[in-house]
Image: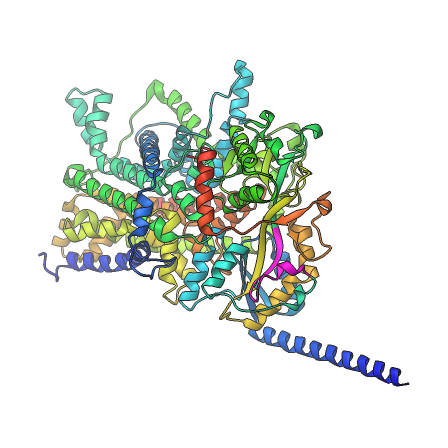
Amino acid sequence: MKKLLVASLFILGAAQAQAQNQLQDMVQLNKARAEGKAAFYANITAVEPIIKAFTADTGVTGEYTRISTSKFVATAITEFEAGKLQADVVQAPLPVLDLLKEKGVLASYRSPAAAGYPEWTRKDEQVQIFGIEYVGLIYNKELVKPADVPKRYEDLTLPKWKDKIVMANPANHPTTISWLVGLKENIFKTEPEWRDFLKGLAANKPMFVASFGPTPAPVESGEKLIAISMPKYIVTKAPAPLDWARLSQPLMGSPRAIAVAAKAPHPAAARAFVDYWLSQKSMEILAKDVGEYVLAPGIYPPIDGIKDAKVIAIRELSDDEIQKWGAEFKKIFDVK
Amino acid sequence: MNGPTNPRTRLTWSLIFIVGALTVFPVLMLVLGSFSEGLTAFGHFTTDKYVAAYTDPAFFEVIANTAIFVLGTSLLSTVLALFLAYLNTRTDIPFKGLFRVISIVPMMIPHLLFAVSWALLLNPSNGLVNLALKQAFGLDEAPFNIYSLWGMILVEGLLELPIAYLIVAPAMASFDVALEESSRVCGAGTWRTLLRVTLPVLRPAILAAFTLGIVRSLASFAVPAMIGMPGRVQVLATHLYTMISTGFATDYGKAAAVGMSVLVASVTLIVVYRALTAESEKFVTVSSRGFRPTLIELGRARLPLFGLVGLLSLALIVLPVAVLLYTSFVPYSMVPSSRAFSLMSLRHWAAVLEDPISLLALKNSLFLAVVGATLGVMLSVFVAYVIVKVKSRAAGLLESLSYLSFSFPGIVIGVGFMWFFVQTPLYATIWALLLGYIATYLPYGIRPMASAFVQIHGHLEESSLVCGASPLTTMRRIIVPLLIPGIVSGWILLASMFVRELTLSVVLSRPGTEVLAVQILRFSEDGLWGRLSALGIVMIFISTTLVVLATVVGNRFKAA
């Protein structure tokens, strides 16, 4: 009888707590609705379906401003210092958010929606990591025979790939620079081995483009056969004849993160947006429609074999390191 | 007559105030940023950014490449513009109306797409022209490599051609053929007359086209990025890009420090240009003593020359537009083949035309083009008048001010505008874009009008004033009707530029103020070439409609 009473009290307490949480959520959502909109600054592809779903599901208008990575910090800081930051939520590669955090642009917020994410993704009180900008080798599956597909990164140095590779400029593209350094720190056993790889890759005279965006087109058209690029293009560029090389080594990429802005014009709407962004529903859209590698458990992009790939987040390089390695790669790759 | 009460002096200083307000502040912000510690315009004074920018060992190679690139580009575009303008305005070559329109179309093609089209034709791996030549002549290697300095000059030269043409053609159209006739009467042949009379008289327009070509190609980014970068040819624009894109904490102050040398070079060019055209009386060809443009009969050269222009038009218009159309229908980047044609669909078109942001961008760009170009031309008429007819130091200052924002590399000036507008209530509104566009591209409005003003004799104005008309009435009744070709050219240049403007828009555009070029850039960043091409064709269609309308309205005014 006593046990039953305790159990009943426990259930009652839990129900009350749940009801209280729901009430709190309702209060928060009503506040967000009263604020009207959540402005979102990011540089991420095709997230309009998430913004649309957020607006439909919450009654708060989501507003997306896309700002390229090279202008992201300059824009956010200029607006913040002038007291005119228009963003409620900012999303960018982790090093960008770290810079904004240093300048006091970010507010503290731990979203309950991130509860199921791996522990390492909760970097601090401000920043939540939700995905990895994963980089791999994508190739033209109509022009490259299965036997010729690289099995290891080192295969890119084989003479058969001479004049057949396209990649983002290793002298200035931050993600490519970080990725190349990531190879040294995560893949190659010794620095000389890594340097041999770099020299071999450079000897194959890859064609350089400004960023990852222009890398798939030359592979699709057959101008080049293989790209150091992002497997997500297999999804966004379907039915292009692209596939990714299943390497015996891990895939790597920079972490993507999200945070609420300090002095956000719509703070409740900002929190509602972050909660929504980190939800299963949004992460599924991001993975399925955009091919992103997200860290919400059990969600993968619809790319054959990617579920079994080991994808690791590379160390975030400081700007000084990026400059230093960019200069080094400039020499190695003979970038004029 | 030179005191502050003189209407011309008042007009000059009013314009200095207006143009100065539009152009000085963003540049001033960049100057501040270049001397400030940190990432914004306001910080502790430092010269470190200049030291770092100008002691970079790569800088001198970049300067050498840039000099070859800009001089080659300007030379190519000016020579081609002269050739086309001469044939179109002064000879009996057939299908003239068509040629006038097609010599303007490349200006409407987004530069990014134009460069990509040429890469598709002339890349050494599977460029269509290279493949055809290899097959036809059994060659082992591709004969052309577009990813080179000459490739950059070719593509940028073709892109700058319409601007040069729109400056040279009005001057050519109002050329007094009596000068040429006198030359022939004195025994000179056609070539001698062309070299000794026609070209010297057109000197202001030629120099204007050449100067503008240099300034534009210095600021150009699409061709250096799409063609120079894969060929590892670094010029100033890509050097600046490298500077701002290496790392996440972009230091625009350092980029502005490099931009200052471009600014100095541009202002020097303007001073040289003013000195070379100082005696503008020499170039006056429309006076009150009768003016009639007559046509030169080409005779047997008519058809071969028409064929040559046709070939040029093919390279300028047909090939890039065909590539765009083709890319908008195929599912992904494919070399033309029967399979590619069988896979064609309207999916990219549907995606673009059903995208609310693309449609809003279309509306905003149209508004900015029509309203911006009209306001820009109104301002340009007065500025050009002062620059040409009021030969004072203040007029020189006005001309330099009009070039100020324009001369700064596009990749940096947008940030200058952001630093400026964020201090005003205009930030994140369509009006910031409108003012920024007019401030930056004012020379496009001024140059064709200045070339036309140079050729209108002061006697016409003086006669009107003597007869009791006010300066404003003189401007409205005498000067403006004679300026119609220049006004139409200026409006077309500005409107087409505003339809595809990217460098300011990418920094100043916000939700609700999206524009076409930014939307195209988004598609390019995501590698969505099909959508990009579809929207590019929409952009070309809008610009063509505006050009045709402007030409028709201009012709009506002339007829009236």
Query: Magenta stretch?
Result: A117-132
Give the camera-side residue of B47 and B448: B47
Q: Is residue B407 visible?
A: no
Residue extending farthest to the top is: B138
Q: Decide: is B406 above or below A258.
A: above
Q: Position of residue B214 (x, y in %)?
A: 31, 38
Residue extending farthest to the left is: B1
Q: Decide: is B125 above or below A121.
A: above
Q: Is residue B125 visible?
A: yes
| Rendered residue at 56%/39% (across/down) | A215
Q: Is residue A123 magenta?
A: yes
Left or right: B48, with B244 as reference point:
left
| Rendered residue at 21%/22% (across/down) | B192
Give the camera-side residue of A163 and B153: A163
Q: Position of residue A12 (x, y in %)?
A: 80, 82
Left or right: A273, with A331 as reference point:
right
Q: Decide: is B496 above or below B60.
A: below
| Rendered residue at 51%/24% (across/down) | B129
Q: Position of residue A181 (x, y in %)?
A: 53, 43
